[in-house]
Amino acid sequence: MDGERLLSRNARAMRSSLIRQLTGLVNRPDVISFAAGSPNAGTFPHEQLRQIHNDLVDRERGGVFQYSVTRGNARLIAAVRDRDRRLKGVRLGSASTLVVSGSQQGLDLVARVLLDPGDAVFVETPSFIGAMASFENVGAKLFEVRCDRQGMDPAHLGARVAEARSLGHPSKLAYVIPNFQNPAGSLWSRQRRREVCAAANQAGLLVLEDDAYGELYFDGVDSADLAPLKAMPDSSHVLYLSTFSKILAPGLRVAWVHGPEPVLRRMEYCKEAADLCTSTLGQRLVLEFLRRGWMPAQVGRVRSFYSAKSKVLKAALGEHFGRLARWRVARGGLFQWLDLPEGVDALALLHASLEADKVAFIPGAPFFAGKPRSNSLRLSFSNVEDENIAAGLSRLSRRVRRALA
């Protein structure tokens, strides 16, 4: 049987991202890889999670492996809401909360519930490829919005909304990552958060705020600067998405969304059809970790780990790329963005670097919804040994010089 012939229109339009296509190449054991955008397993609280797991199994036997409710464990939801109020200033008001199986499921559910084919979604330049894939998989049309050092340009957002509507694209959603964005590592200013929040509200847009990295800030960053858009006075139009993947462990697959109940209810229906519920065991592990008061120390350890790695990367960049690239030093998160000289093609550079130098990174082009910057690239420092950071960047800088020559 020709399975291809039976595919839906949506399925026929789906494509694997370049990052997925490159995974087998860039994650070889003989390669110094700045490609993997995953947390370092050395930061996971293995012993504490093992202790909680054993205690739960001893106490509850099979109950901890049973189905949960689709909306999520009620005690976990209460704990997450309380934590987001206290630590992040998130204004919940009448907002509801849904536990999801990782941030990626949250993105997918928002796309399925809000977007029809041809609807416009407004994204940063560049933006997270996983979110853009979720929007495009339901037939949405992506519109890039210009960004500067302060964040998304609110005036340009308004202009792009007007443009999209003039072209017949209903405009419902803006997707933003104000804290240490994947891929660019950028951090929005407080003023820009207020302006974009207000501009989106004025334009009649819902805002999907993705805050996967906000707790991973480094020395010199004031935590008050990280207050989400959902902490703004008038933020009822903001859907706030966050996760425990970066501060605990991604394999737990526990994330959450705060937002208007009518939207969350439909997301719950959609989730029920997709997976019934987020892992009961994962939710209980997280809940007990929070209940025992271990989270502040865990976040502190994780933050210190990545902060130290970022300093090693900063020194190596200064030594090897001082005149070869432009960058803004990442102040948190897992990523560093580089713009190489015009004329250097990062994808061609990757293939040459892999073959000759055994160094990998992710080209920047896939992170653009519009015209890509082919001379850009993303470095992830989370899983590179300290001694390999300088060695890898030294080799890569020589490869860039050869490309320029």
Image: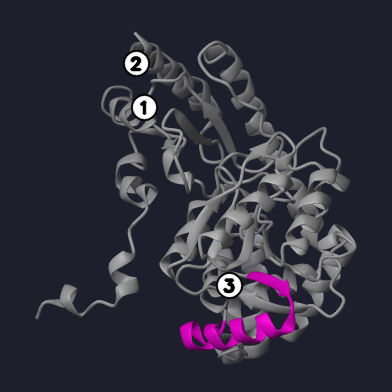
Labels 1 and 2: the sequence-earlier one:
1
Q: Secondary structure at mark 2?
A: helix
Specify whether residue 257 is painted magenta: yes
Using the image, determine if residue 323 lies above or below residue 24: above
Magenta span covers which residues?
255-277
Query: Which of the pair 28/373 is nearer the observer?
Result: 373
Residue shown at 52%/32% (left/top)?
385
Q: Marks 2 and 1: in contact by CB < 8 Å? A: yes
Name the residue carrying label 1.
345
Q: Residue at x 66, y 69 (%)?
A: 51
Q: Can you give x and y, in whole percent of width and height, for residue 265 in the image?
A: 65, 86
The answer to which quarter of the image holds residue 253 is: bottom right
> Residue 240 appears in which quarter of the rendering?
bottom right
Residue 273 visible in the shown view = yes
- Name the kind of residue labelled 1 in the image: Asp
Which numbered dot is residue 403?
Answer: 2
Residue 110 circle label: 3
